[in-house]
Amino acid sequence: MDRMLVIFKKEYLQKVKSLGFWLTTILMPVFMFGIMIVPMLLMTRQKPTITVTVVDPGGVVYPALLAAQEERSEAVKNSNTQVGKTSIDHQPEVAVVFKKSSGESPEVLQKKVEEKTIDGYVVIPEDFLKASEIEFYARNLSNITAIQALESILNRTQFAMKTRALNLSPGDKDFLRARLEIKGFKVEKGKAKEEGALAGFFAVMAIFMTLYMLILIYGSFIMRAVLEEKSTRVVEILISSVPPFQLLMGKILGVAAAGLTQTAVWIGTAVLLSAGALPFAASTGALPSFTALQLVFFVVFFVMGYLLFASLYAAVGAMFNNEQEAQQAATIIVIPIIVPVIMMQMVIADPSSTASVVISLIPIFTPLIMYLRILVETPPAWQIALSLVLTTATLIGVIYVSGKIYRTGILMYGKRPNLKELWRWVRA
């Protein structure tokens, strides 16, 4: 046991003191912060303007279109000042400049579009009040914010003309335009707490993907470490003083501790970066709630998932002589890690379905799927207990088999073993 602790300490310190570890630890939060904040800052600085020619044969819609454009601009300005409040009028600020067509033919208008004189043109049908679609011709139809702005103005125009035709008062218009919004309350343990639906969804996604990436990345680290020691023949010296199983477990646990250290740094950084927004998010119900038990299960399922896949990666590393051969075999290990990601949406939508329950009880999927179910809707205690028992039993079996393969394969060089030889190693 003392020797295993020495290996554990050596692996942990070697990983934590490495430049790559700290570059990843520091740059990952910076990268995540950048991809979330920088696009938002760029959007606030940019106020795109599109010029649209309006082909209005009847000449009735164009004046109403200009009025709707002014009304929308005022609504966007007001909604942007109401921080934390969702509104139907809250649209990206895109300025749409309308020009009335002076009877140009479609060919002429298309030429203007191609020459970039105008960004596009819309064709108003004669039965505009009954229309469900409006034709829009442009060079670029991928500018979603501009398309949404144009669509919003056209919808406002049609609504205003319909209410005018029905001789409705301004109060009637506001009454018809009002929409219902969902105010979510999460019910758990006999209590209801307000929680933003989107905030909860993205928080679950973030934690699930963090667990997935940690298991995948740190499991593969073990394979590379085994291959490196095997290729440099360092392992021959280590084996002379440390039993193979203790060497394997010390290595696996040391890298696991480094992974948890890195995760703790990431979580602490995320809390510090969002500290200013936490009180506001909590007051608006946008902040998802996590229990202490969920955080405990994060560590439990990370350790179990990591040990399971790290043992498999270690066995693969011991079986082969170079990383290229090992990576090809490791593809088989990656598949059970990817399957939970594919099933993620189904589990989030219905965590209590038969399929979700069955998959979460399959040990190789349990660390990710069962934890996802716990985050979304806590399953019955017996299901959690059964998943832990099944995964623990599987983990013991996998570690035993991997240890047998590691003990023999770590000192084997030359051709890679076939299934018959692997079976002989396990039985030895």
Image: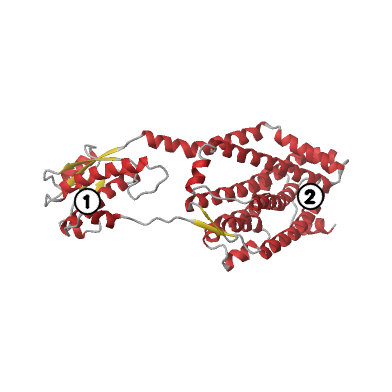
Q: Residue type at mark 2?
A: Tyr
Left/right placement of residue 112 relative to residue 205 reads: left
Left/right placement of residue 378 relative to residue 109 reads: right
Q: Nearer the viewer, residue 10 or 331?
A: 10
Q: Residue 213 location in percent, x, y?
A: 61, 47
Which residue carries the number 1 mark? 157
Q: Tell me the mark number nearer the camera, choosing from 1 and 2.
A: 1
Q: Residues within 10 Å of mark 2 (few under 14, many from 20)?
A: many
- Which residue is at a point 28% across and 49% down the rendered structure image? 152
Question: Is residue 233 something that shows in the picture?
Answer: no
Instruction: Choose top left, top right, bottom left or bottom right for residue 7.
Output: top right
Q: Residue 386 location in percent, x, y?
A: 70, 64
Question: Is residue 116 something that shows in the picture?
Answer: yes
- Which residue is at a point 77% across and 59% down the rendered structure image? 420
Count the numbered circles shown: 2
Q: Residue 399 location in percent, x, y?
A: 77, 54
The kind of secondary structure element at disc 2 is helix
Q: Are marks 1 and 2 in contact (CB under 8 Å)?
A: no
Q: Quadrant of the N terminus?
A: top right
The kind of secondary structure element at disc 1 is helix
Q: Nearer the viewer, residue 69 or 316?
A: 69
Q: Residue 270 location in percent, x, y?
A: 57, 39
Which residue carries the number 2 mark? 406
Left/right placement of residue 127 relative to residue 132 reads: left
